[in-house]
Image (spheres, coloured by chain):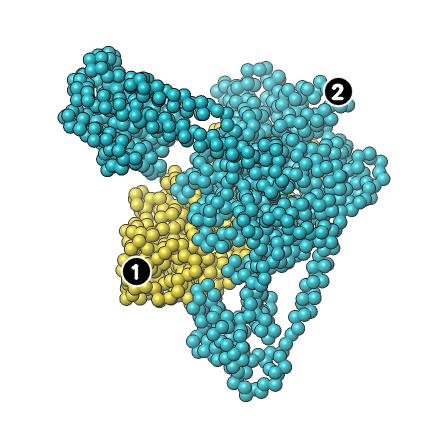
Amino acid sequence: MTWCGNHQIGPISRREALRETSAGFGALALHGLLGQWAMADQRPPLTGQGSSPLSPRLAGFTPRAKRVIFLFMHGGPSQVDTFDHKPALRRDHGKPYPGQKPRVQFAQTGNLMESPYRFAQHGESGQWVSEIFPEVAKMVDDLCLVKSLHGSNPAHGAALMKIHTGSDTFVRPSMGSWITYGLGSENENLPGFVTICPTLGHGGVVNWSSAFLPAAHHGVPMGNAAIPAARAQFAHMTAGLPKDLQRAQLDYLQAVEQERLGAVGHDPQLEGRIESFELAFRMQSEAPDVTDISQESQATFDLYGVGDDQTDHFGRQCLMARRFAEAGVRFIQCTHSYKWDQHGNLERDHRKNASEVDRPIAGLLRDLKQRGMLDDTLVLWGGEFGRTPDAQDGNGRDHNPHAFTMWMAGGGVKPGFSFGATDEWGYYAQDNKVHVHDLHATILALLGLNHERLTYRHAGRDFRLTDVEGRVVRELFG
Amino acid sequence: MLCLLLLTATDPGLELFERTVRPMLVDHCISCHGGDKIRGGLVLSTPEGMAKGGDAGTVIHPGDASSSRLLEALEYHNPDFRMPPSGRLPESTIADVRRWIELGAPDPRPPRSSEAAIEESALQLKDRLQHWAYRPMGNEAPPIHSAQHPIDRFIGDKLARAGGTPSPPAEESQLLRRLHLSLTGLPPTLEQLRAFDESHASERFNLTLDKLLDSPHYGERWARHWMDVARYSDSNGLDENTAFANAWRWRDWVIQALNDDLPYDQFVTMQLAGDLLPPTDNRDLARDRIIATGFLGLGPKVLAEPDKAKMRADIVDEQLDTIGKTFLGQTIGCARCHDHKFDPIPARDYYSMAGIMHSTQTMATFNTVARVLERPAAHPEVIAERKAWESDLEAAESAIGQVQKQVDAGLQDTWLTKLPQAIEAVAQMPISRIGREAEAFDRSNLNQDFDHWGPGIGVIHTTRPNELQFVEWDVEVPASGRWTLALRYASAESRPLKLIINGTETSNDALAAATGSFYPDTQRWVDVYTGDWPAGSVTIRLERPVSFPHIDRMSLRHTTLEAHTTDQFVAVAQSLNLPVGFVTRLHEQLVFTPEWTQDPNATQIEIRSILQKDRTSSDGETDSNQKTVRNRWLDDGPFSPTDLERAGASKVDFEAWTFAKQHLEQIQAMEVPIAPDTISVRDEPEPRSVKLHARGDHTQRIGEAIPRGFLQVSDHLVPAPPIESNSGRLDLALWMLHPEHPLTARVIVNRVWQGHFGVGLVDTPSDFGTRGGKPTHPELLDWLARWFIQDGWSLKRLHRLILTSETWQQSSQHRPDMAQLDPDNTLLWRSHRRRYEAEAIRDAILTVSDGIDPTMGGSLLETDNFAYVNNDQSASNESYEDRRRAIYLPVIRNDMYDLYSIFDYPDASVSFGKRPSTVVSSQALFFLNAPLVLEEAERLAGVLHTSPIEDALTELWNRAYARSPRAEERQRASHLLRTLDVDNSARSAWMGLIQSVFASSEFIYLD
């Protein structure tokens, strides 16, 4: 029994209250406690069956990362032109692919096509990187490349939903929502899950929605892909009245609500509302500070490419991601929106795309490193699928969910490491295959969450990010 | 099996088994095919499992390795079927397995019977049928209790047994708000409050109840509840977010059906099988039956799914999931991949019901981007009448086209002979006008679009909406004087431009008016600037930070010279015996294409050639250059006669034309019933039963086709009817609506109960399965369900029954003693305090501020049918500023109105039986900063701030809370008004107070 004012309430109604009343954006009232569980290598007590956001879902994993920054390359970057070096494509250029093509293809493809770019080995780890990523190449000794990813759907919309939510068919909670649901937020004045300039197509909000999880775990968009990062904002964050007048309004409201609470008796929702107005007021002060990058030095701008036309959009996103990470946001996504879909003109356009993100990404990695944040920040790079090694339209490549490369950095992954392999031409993932579900299971594990126990009861059954699949790829752990 | 036991250890097959096969099974297979996990129904941990195979059939044919699926998987040749998933095993292992199968695949492991398991599962199924929701509805009469009302007797009896007592009635003002919001979703207006106060105390509750049940707003309120379970949306969502621009017809039908109190059994039947009901003479009913089936087509679908078989299976799955949750409270979808783990729904039942939906056509096309089926919403006779009229219209149009061509040809030939003189005459007129095609700019970052306005006709509009948009023209002004700048443009919305002339800003709202569309049908000339200029060079610049209107042409007119031009046109026309209109149009044309004046005879030759081509070849196929000329001179130019000018044709021709024209106008004026398209379904020509899909995978179909049918859960109560309608949808409805069906009536009375109490008797309204909630008052639920059926399935009478109970009218006041006894109020010792939904919050704000528009029905969607509501780079064009009730605002999947998302309206992609009610800071930010709140507060402040403060406070409290303020409330509010009144602006202080009232719990909660 817990005593609350003069009213005794039973454990059931208290749990109910906490489930419905999470006053921060992504904040759980007991986030500190969860944070402790997440950080310390200890098993939390087991209660409930995963039906309350507060019931622990951490089981036996040592958390290595505290937060995630997902650099999403919308459109599907070609693995064989970026990180998955395939000399056989040069040898067999113009010949038909000798293996069997998939049963379901997005469109017809022609013969094999060599990469138009030069590859070279970099760093002490000697990993191959294409010439279009010169800055990222300098950071390869921090990257953990997974070259054997595969998904299930060759259409953008379904593949986006798959990579973000684990389902290409239904509306399910996004990975960021699951993570904030599992870990809470480190800063009750900010959302736990922020997505900067997200794409509105190909699933749109489905890719950052909390679906049936409590609304507090919904991703909070800052702008969208139709708006340059320089103008991206959170909604309703511009004060309706001058601050001192708004304070007077709040004081009035608090008096009204307190009086009402006294009159109607105990009511957890009412108590939550009183707190939520104070939080909103604080958030209104704090969020603009975090998103205002004007205080950063010129050196930092240069590091991220902010101010340079080519890199400004993604550079700002990466810089804001670092600031959100510092401020305690749990899951941050940056989106390079729908650029990477080169069915034709791959040589020109993949080069251009890379030039827009190469410096910002390398800048983010360097910056996190010099601030000592890379150790507990997991950076994830990749698209919704890869591309075919055979040609489309003579100089492009088609969608390919059967093989793609993603890389991780920091957050407890093995640096300077490459895992898994595709076949000789890069058409199918072959050795040490990692499915999207496996990737999700692994990311959760790095955060100390067991993907099989991070569940939520909805419509009569317990749901998971990984559905009934998923293998934690421990080989990637540092 | 026995023969295996006789094999000796030196058997080469057994040796292979021990050396290679067993280690392989242990290391690579059994983690997914045995023990805790059994993927694909395949158990490799026992010899029986190995022999039996999985969902997709056997995996080993002893003695025949090449036809054994086990080997196929190991060999990795088939990209869709490779095992183990982590990578191909070494060649030597695969060779050993091949050899082992060739040797008869001997398996020495001890057998384990699985018969026990089968029996166990049958027992479980039987056991699960004991679950309350599958048992017959009880027949218990309301218990003996002091209360009169049957509901109060059930509730009171249970409460008393638990040692509790009910709460006293709520205050009358609270009850009044409850009644209004529960039934109509709107707070009482001042007028309604007055009427209530003036009526007799003993009857005013019932009077109000009657009035509200008769109010059209009742249908709007309860249709919104139904739209939640029906996952209503105006767009597809998922991967390709295209518009359902006709979905609103279904929504409006639901509103009307509820207002008409259409009995629930008919309401259900029409939505599942309206198209299959016997013909009727009632035209409205025939129309509504088609519209009602939109329920089946409204779901989200992966429209670019390349695997068409998967798309089909997924669409059926979505339909079954929605049907199951909505009408039956069953999570049928779980049985797609396996027998339901908790409820007695075997996968077989799923596929027998799936057959019904597979026999129903939902899609017009599966080709990317796929489209949902639409049918004309009308009685067949209406459709026939409409078709006949359309063909008459077509004939009349074609008739006048013939005659008109002849009339016009005569006129054109006459005009053509005088063209050189006319050009010379016009060219000699002083230059009073300079024109320029907009796309012939000197500098701009706008897009030149030649695709949508006719051949060769270009406009300029936005390319990249993220940067400052601009266009500049350098113009040589030939003479000093007063010039007027005009632009011809079209824009569906207001896009005001900044106008800068020679570096000086002269306007910041040029072309601000919307014309009605972005296309030529609404384009118009607008004067944007008049000023005195010297002769010489002028730079005209337009700019806007975001999207531009679509600009077609720019022109400068010399105001003083222009005054004389009309006279000059008349003079030229008279001297050459030409219509003034022709001369005027020729002048306009030459202003924009002055090059045609250089050699008038050559111009005549060119135009003649185009006219001839136009008349001889039916499709007038010319090169694009000629198309442009044709477009400018004929379609939209001097050689296109007006009706008035046609009177100048020969008498015979003109009479024929007049006759045809009158005929056409008569047909156009006829009142023909319309048959607009609406989302609907129809039966496939041949019904299709489907096979079980192993693990829900459409590529793994196994066994015999399963006959179409229904869930077995009610077989013991309701005989499953044979399927007689083609697809079986009508039989499905009949089966559900059988008076002994244990689910249908229980589910709907529980939904209605939840609508009035905030919590259902079963708190999982769409899941009555074993994992869902149990009824707190099972006898009451059953009594209500039977009453509802016997009473004729009337929802309005059910509302009345519930609302007249003392239970519903109780106070929501907290009582510590009862809270200790029953903290969750499951005994209903008081009313649940609850926040109302997103739509009701918005509508309440607009009602209180007098800003609401009560217009009912129709569509507010901006996007064309099947066009993208939004795509990767663009936000949706939809606007939520309309002042009609929220139910009429667009519901856009993937991009919900932010007010909805903030207040727990889930993305409208799945059937939702109960909305969450969270308290998050984004709600507080909404009340503090959202334009809607600020604007409506300001609107009401405009009314209140001029009244004496005490009167104004009374009015505000009555509008918002349906009561007058207490003394301390007056004091507190006056204090806030003084604090906010910083610059002596009473109106802005009032605005701040009203905003706080909107934000207060008493306003958005029902006590």
What count of labels does the image hold? 2
Judging from the image, mark 2 belongs to the subunit labelled B
State which quarter of the image contains the N terminus of chain B: bottom right
Q: Which mark is residue A113?
A: 1
Q: Nearer the viewer, mark 2 or mark 1?
A: 1
Q: Decide which of B969, B795 is in the foreground and name it.
A: B795
The percent position of residue B28, horizontal first and vertical second, equals: 51, 71
Dividing the picture into quadrants, the one containing residue B597 is: top left
Q: Decide which of A415, B359 is in the foreground and name it.
A: B359
Q: CA distance from mark 2 to mark 1?
A: 87 Å
Q: Is residue B629 left or right of residue A239?
A: left
Dividing the picture into quadrants, the one containing residue B208 is: top right
Among the chains, which one is yellow? A
Tag 2 and tag 1, C-beta contact below 8 Å: no
Amino acid type shown at disc 1 = Met
- For label 1, the SS is loop
Q: Is residue B819 left or right of residue B887?
A: right
Amino acid type shown at disc 2 = His
Dividing the picture into quadrants, the one containing residue B183 is: top right
> Looking at the image, can residue A330 be seen?
no
> Looking at the image, can residue B43 be seen?
yes
- For label 2, the SS is loop
The percent position of residue B894, horizontal first and vertical second, equals: 49, 43
Judging from the image, mark 1 belongs to the subunit labelled A
Q: Which mark is residue B200?
A: 2
Q: Decide which of A386, B6 is in the foreground and name it.
A: B6
State which quarter of the image contains the C terminus of chain B: top right
Among the chains, which one is cyan? B
Q: Where B748 falls versus A75 (above or below)?
A: above
Neighbor class of circle 2 (other Cα within 10 Å; few <14, some 14-19, many 20+) is: few
Point 23% across, 21% down: residue? B414
The percent position of residue A60, horizontal first and vertical second, equals: 56, 62
